[in-house]
């Protein structure tokens, strides 16, 4: 008997915005292969309709909401949830604790809910006090009303167990191994430092920019990312690129093939994410064999273990670590090999998709 699932809380399918969207691009076709009727809720203008990888079996429903930095997730989550309550799928996979506010609506219709809680959103520096309080309350509501929660790292699971008395199901992110990614024409192979990140303070962006000015005295530096809203970080990246011929800023890149090539041929990839669990960009960098310098956090250490070089979040420390890796081919090779081996053993999409399918199926049997 076919089962139906509604995926709520992402920007749609296929979208290239962030980690949730990466998961949806992988999971939706897998579920369709397993016999599920899959509906992905999204936002107008955030999907790639011409994407050749788009699976026609996946139904895409865009709903309306407020395009505001603090309220977009809440508003789109509400309209998606209301639409789903009319459809009454067998189970809902909900992304982000901000949508905890709307779980009672699904529960009232006896729709089981699995919530991926993501990271500790209320600890992100980009949010003001009101937004942080809203996310924290959303987490408490998630702990109260979700049938099951998914945590993408053991450390996040520990935090949820301590703070909200909820045990999570551990499902991380996977990585895609590229097939012979082409060399980056304008940059020397294994001869440039790379950062790929959304421009928010908790991703150590300002500190990397400080380091980039030092590193660029001897090596090329490539910056990929943007804030999505403009602002100080975008302005500084533009200024660095326009005044320093060894620093290049590409903005937000949606092309996976290009991103994979940038990771695969980097001499040193800097991963500065500090709030959250298993970061999908880090896992993908590992799948590409990128020698990685990471901000020292429990989350990054859990994922990389001995396959990374760890640094404090300041420009001098980051610059010194990047220079160490860029100047030592043997170290690059060791980090690259170790990262790839760990990704293959712990963080594959096959493992991730299979576990989600099992959890969703179990939820439908519990009602």
Image (cartoon, helix red, strand yellow):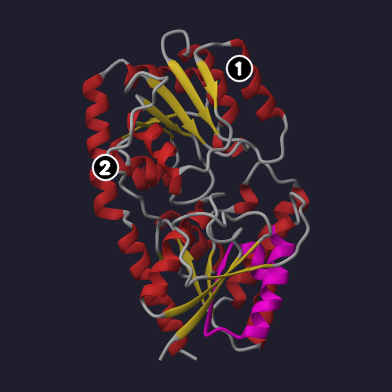
Q: Earlier in the sequence, mark 1 or mark 2?
A: 1
Q: Quadrant of residue 34?
A: bottom left
| Relative depth, front residue between 12 and 367 | 12
The percent position of residue 132, horizontal first and vertical second, equals: 70, 52
Q: Quadrant of residue 257?
A: top left
Q: Is residue 169 visible?
A: no
**How far apart, in angstroms, are the residues tagged by discs 1 and 2?**
32 Å
| Relative depth, front residue between 271 and 221 | 221
The percent position of residue 170, horizontal first and vertical second, equals: 40, 64
Q: Which mark is residue 230?
A: none
The percent position of residue 85, horizontal first and vertical second, equals: 66, 82
Q: Secondary structure at mark 1?
A: helix
The residue stretch that appears in magenta: 73-101
Looking at the picture, does residue 321 appear above or below residue 41? Answer: above
Q: Quadrant of residue 94?
A: bottom right
| Residue 98 sits inside the magenta stretch | yes
* Screen quadrant of the N terminus: bottom left
Task: Determine contact: label 1, label 2, CB under 8 Å.
Answer: no
| Residue 284 sits inside the magenta stretch | no
Looking at the picture, does residue 36 appear above or below residue 207? Answer: below
Q: Which residue is at 64% across, 22% downward?
A: 238
Q: Secondary structure at mark 2?
A: helix
Q: Is residue 251 left or right of residue 261?
A: right
Label 2 CA crowd tier, 10 Å (few <14, some 14–19, many 20+): many
Looking at the picture, does residue 77 appear above or below residue 267? Answer: below
Give the residue number, with chain letter if any, for mark 2.
Answer: 340
Q: Which residue is at 41% across, 17% downward?
A: 320
Q: Which mark is residue 240?
A: 1
Label 1 CA crowd tier, 10 Å (few <14, some 14–19, many 20+): some
Q: Is residue 100 left or right of residue 340?
A: right
The percent position of residue 58, horizontal first and vertical second, equals: 50, 70
């Amino acid at each position: 008997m076919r089962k139906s699932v509604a995926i709520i809380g992402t920007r749609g399918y296929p979208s290239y915005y962030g980690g949730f969207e990466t998961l949806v691009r992988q999971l939706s076709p897998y579920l369709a292969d397993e016999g599920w009727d899959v509906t992905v809720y999204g936002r107008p203008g955030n999907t790639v309709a011409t994407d050749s990888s788009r699976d026609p079996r996946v139904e895409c429903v865009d709903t309306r909401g407020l395009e505001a930095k603090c309220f977009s997730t809440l508003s789109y989550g509400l309209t998606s949830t209301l639409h789903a309550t009319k459809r009454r799928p067998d189970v809902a996979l909900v992304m982000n604790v901000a949508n905890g506010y709307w779980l009672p609506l699904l529960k009232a219709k006896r729709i089981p809910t699995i919530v991926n809680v993501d990271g500790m959103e209320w600890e992100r520096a980009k949010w003001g006090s009101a937004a942080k309080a809203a996310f924290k309350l959303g987490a408490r509501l998630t702990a109260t009303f979700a049938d099951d929660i998914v945590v993408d790292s053991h450390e996040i699971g520990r935090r949820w167990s301590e703070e909200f008395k909820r045990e999570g199901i551990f499902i991380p992110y996977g990585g895609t191994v590229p097939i012979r990614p082409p060399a980056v024409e304008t940059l020397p192979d294994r001869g440039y430092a790379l950062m790929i990140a959304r421009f928010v303070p908790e991703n150590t962006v300002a500190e990397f920019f400080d380091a980039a000015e030092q590193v660029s005295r001897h090596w090329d530096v490539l910056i990929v990312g943007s804030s999505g809203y403009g602002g100080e970080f975008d302005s500084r990246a533009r200024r660095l690129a326009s005044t320093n011929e060894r620093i290049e800023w590409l903005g937000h890149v949606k092309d996976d093939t290009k991103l994979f090539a940038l990771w695969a041929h980097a001499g040193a990839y800097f991963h500065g994410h500090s709030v959250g669990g298993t970061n999908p960009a880090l896992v993908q960098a590992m799948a590409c064999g990128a020698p990685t310098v990471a901000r020292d956090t429990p989350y990054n250490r859990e994922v990389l273990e001995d396959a990374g070089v760890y640094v404090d979040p300041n420009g001098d420390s980051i610059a010194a670590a990047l220079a160490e890796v860029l100047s030592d081919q043997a170290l690059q090779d060791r980090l690259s090999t170790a990262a790839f081996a760990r990704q293959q053993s712990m963080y594959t999409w096959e493992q991730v998709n299979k576990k989600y399918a099992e959890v969703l199926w179990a939820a439908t049997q519990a009602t």
